[in-house]
Image: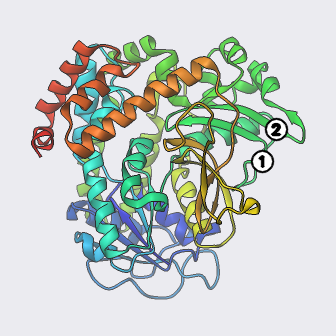
Amino acid sequence: MRLMIAGGGGFRVPLVYRALASGAFAGLVSELVLFDVDPARLRAITAVLRAMPESDGRPAGGPTAGGRPAGGPAAGPRSGVRPPAVRSTTSLPEALAGTDLVFAAIRPGGTAGRIHDERVAQDLGLLGQETTGAGGISYALRTIPEMLHLARQMKEFCPDAWLINFTNPAGMVTEALLPVLGRKVIGICDSAGGLVHRAARAAGLPLPDGRLDGVGYFGLNHLGWLYRLESGSQDLLPGLLSNPAALSTFEEGRLFPQRFLQDLGALPNEYLYYYYQQDSAAAAMRAMAQTRGESIHHQQAELYPRLASAGPDAYTLWDAARRSREEGYLAEARTRGEQRDEDDLAGGGYERVALAVMRALAGAGEAQLILNTPNMLPSDPGGGAAPGSTTTEPAIPGLPADAVVEVPCTVTPDGAVPLPQSPPGTEQLTLLRRVKEVERLTARAATHGDRTAAVDAFSRHPLVGSPALGAKLLAGYERAFPPLLELWRG
């Protein structure tokens, strides 16, 4: 199978390659094509792959840039399984031709753009975060047009290929791509699945990879709740929520007061910290010497040139930077001196979700994963429905059946099928509906060049809630990103 990564010069690409070269996913992909618009970033990341220790899996001779795939004897711990041949290119048609699967993780505007996403909101006294609130809308406005271009190119050069979307904001981008790719696009995120597995371990019920039996989870990307965790006929979640010691063993359990969680009757996704503790989150961000985006931008601006010329030390340099980056994740939610769990610092979450989806699509056995997919339950083939057909019944009651939601799904070669969930509580459903309205306004603005929809999206977001602020936000982002003006004219 041939896999193309759009955003092949991205910082986390070595995690994907490491998983493909050894372990459970070794042998899944025979050829890996890295596509990026920035040749310097491609050179840096291929240098990291070339220097990766053989214990992680490394092709002898390393990847090549814009030429023939790397060859040589098999490497890695699984005897007889070759790591994927790797090549890189800055030509999108060349990268797509003959591809079976596309994994998209692009960042239009780079890390410098993320700084503007955060700072424009912060300068107006609002939460400045990459995917949540005003910053997430700004990110989507410049990302959706680029992803639509990728999807249309896929229809021309690899019409049968699947798109696994990790480009943020993942749910919003996935919904915008549905009119072009239909069921051939699946959105992924490691945040929800990570919450479920951490909570299950804390409750004494570790879940096997690829199974979510007894798990209840509903929401949108970066806005969801774990509400059920069954073992047999017993729901273990109430006991976990009433146990402060158990909650203190994992990140989401520490983010929120124990009494609040017990009254809520659910474990929120970590990004709900920005909703439930909006004022303290915004104040903590303003108190930081630099935003998360500024920290990552400065790190990468210094790191990438060094990687390209580091030779055998490139992997070591990259891995140290990766760990430092993980240590700063969601720092505004932790007290001074509090460290992330060692399991979280080890890395390796989103690529396992992506590759588990790919493996199931390839017919190597179905998997259950929390994914971003339309809210439509499947029809009953026993009732005369065609296999793979859907109903207008929603997986999450109360949300439109055609809306992209984040729920447990079963993945087969026919795609991702959502599993039915319990109705959200009144307050949860109100928040979900409002944010979904904002997501759809944003997609309309980015797809059709509708500036009024963009102002409405900013204005109606729960973390903004003001038409006057909505207008100021868009004006600020237009100054930061002049191409937005061309979007409205186009």
Residue 353, image x and y in percent?
57, 55
Query: Is there any visible trace of residue 298 in the rendered image?
Result: no
Residue 367, image x and y in percent?
67, 59
What amino acid type should be assigned to the residue bearing mark 1?
Asp
Q: Nearer the viewer, residue 343 or 55?
A: 343
Where does label 2 land, which residue? 230
Cα distance, mark 1 to mark 2? 8 Å
Give the numbered dot on residue 213: 1
Q: Is residue 224 above or below residue 46?
A: above
Q: Nearer the viewer, residue 145 or 99?
A: 145
What is the count of numbered marks? Answer: 2
Q: Looking at the image, is mark 1 or mark 2 earlier in the sequence?
A: 1
Query: Is there any visible trace of residue 268 in the rendered image?
Result: yes
Q: Quadrant of residue 478?
A: top left
Toward the front, the furthest residue is: 384
Give the colouring mode of the picture: rainbow
What amino acid type should be assigned to the residue bearing mark 2?
Glu
Q: Residue at x 48, y 19 (%)?
A: 275
Residue 88, image x and y in percent?
30, 73
Q: Are marks 1 and 2 in contact (CB under 8 Å)?
A: yes
Q: Taking 481 as reference, is 365 left or right?
A: right
Q: Taking 253 as reference, is 400 left or right?
A: left
Residue 456, image x and y in percent?
28, 25
Q: Residue at x 50, y 29 (%)?
A: 271
